[in-house]
Amino acid sequence: MILAASAEMLYLDLPFLDRVERIADRGLQVEIWNWATKDVDALAASGATFSSMTGYLDGNLTEPDGIDRLIDTARESLAVAATLDCPRLNLHGTGLDGNGLPVRPVDVVTPSMWLTAVDTLKRIAALGQEAGRVFTLENLNLAVDHPRTPFAKAADTLALVRAVDSPHLKMNLDLYHAQIGEGNLIALIEESLPHIGEIQVADVPGRCEPGTGEINYPAIAAALRRVGYDGVIGLEGWASSDPDAALDAFEAAFA
């Protein structure tokens, strides 16, 4: 398994480029969010290996104006991914604001919305195929961090990815969100395995490094080895105290 960590959530007292370099110096790949707020050329020159980045700036999967904006900014994101040589670009069920809340919240996802979302994601997958990159659709949680976000549950993202059925659209299985929303993580991994493009981790509650909460990450790691998962595991969590200690705990959990 390949280990990565989010520069958005660690070493927060440092400038962003320094965060990237600190993670890379540990031999980990680096994950970033909104590329539009970053010096992309400086990131490209850093020598870091980028595992994933946000694959859109705004838009959504179901509304005509939102779809157009999603497609347009996905194209822009692919150009940045080429500069950074970043293989995966992350998506959500809808655009999120700075607090992680949906820009256009939804209370009921209708059958029409499901069909439209599949069509939109087929277009996204086609863009990924043209560029030789993979878009990943991340599950979120509704109870704590992202209330009223459509297509948020792991079951939802898995259903959409299965419906599109393209190697250029995969699932970003976030186990922190899945534990809050659904639980039964090992069974979820087993069911999702053919469709997983990346796995992200943090503990519950608190969204900090493995070992700070209720998730048995050594058991998760053993299950991943058993099923033959050899992709990326990304720490998308806060450091409970010292960022280096948090990364030590993360690496130990998946050693």
Image (cartoon, rainbow, N blue to C red):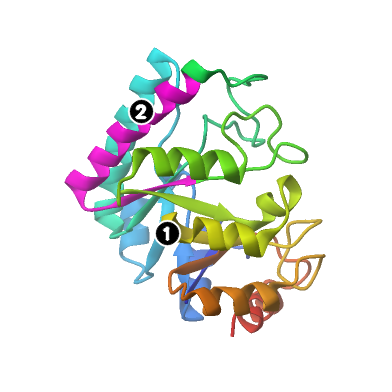
Residue at the farthest top position: 64
Q: Report the predominant secondary structure element of the magenta stretch.
A: helix
Query: Is residue 91 found left or right of 42 in the rendered image?
Result: right
Residue at (58% x, 20% y) in the render:
104
Dot 1 corresponds to which residue?
A: 194
Decide which of 229, 56 is in the foreground and name it. 229
Query: Is residue 70 found left or right of 109 in the rendered image?
Result: left
Q: Secondary structure at mark 2?
A: helix
Instruction: Find the magenta span and give its range.
Output: 113-137
Q: Secondary structure at mark 1?
A: helix
Residue 50 screen position, x and y as percent:
39, 63
Dot 2 corresponds to which residue?
A: 120
Residue at (66% x, 77% y) in the render:
244
Residue 86 screen position, x and y as percent:
33, 58
Residue 237 screen position, x and y as percent:
66, 60
Answer yes or no: do the residues labelled 1 and 2 have beta carbons within 8 Å? no
Cα gap from disc 1 to disc 2, whole angstroms? 21 Å
Residue at (73% x, 73% y) in the render:
242
Whether residue 7 is visible, yes or no, is no
Q: Is 182 rendered above or below residue 99?
A: below
What's the amino acid at mark 2? Thr
Q: Is 110 rendered above or below residue 205?
A: above
Residue at (28% x, 44% y) in the render:
78
